[in-house]
Amino acid sequence: MRPGCLSKQIYYRNDKKYPYYQISYTYKMKSHTEYVRDEFVSEVREQIKNYKRFKRLTNRWVDLAIKHAKLKMKIKVKKSGK
């Protein structure tokens, strides 16, 4: 699992194209860019996909926790009659 975006880049040299992949991400307030070898591209894609899923689920969990906390407070206020 890792954050980031994977992109294909083209390096030109002597009128020839040399494609390569790189991953770019921000972690702990610092941006990073790393080269990814061809044999690891599918693995890195899967890691990025897993991270995005984790983030979606975590955000959903936080949303529900906030709603739950608000409802609990509302119920306590109604029970106390205030």
Image (spheres, rainbow, N blue to C red):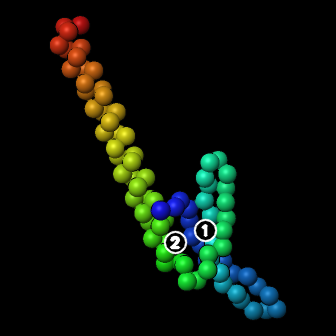
In terms of secondary structure, where does tag 1 sit? strand
Kind of residue at badge 1: Ile
Left or right for 45, reference 54: right
In which image quadrant can residue 72 be found? Answer: top left
Above or below, comparing residue 35 to residue 69 in the picture: below
In which image quadrant can residue 67 be found? Answer: top left
Report the quarter where the C terminus lies: top left
Q: Residue at x 30, y 26 (%)?
A: 70
Residue 12 position within the rendered picture, expressed as x and y whole percent measured from the top left: 76, 85
| Residue annotated with mark 2 | 44
Above or below, comparing residue 18 to residue 4 in the picture: below
Kind of residue at badge 2: Val
| Residue annotated with mark 1 | 23
Q: Badge 1: few (under 14), some or many (20 or more) residues near its Cα, within 10 Å?
A: many
Do the numbered discs 1 and 2 sit on residues whose CB atoms are within 8 Å? yes
Of labels 1 and 2, earlier in sequence is 1
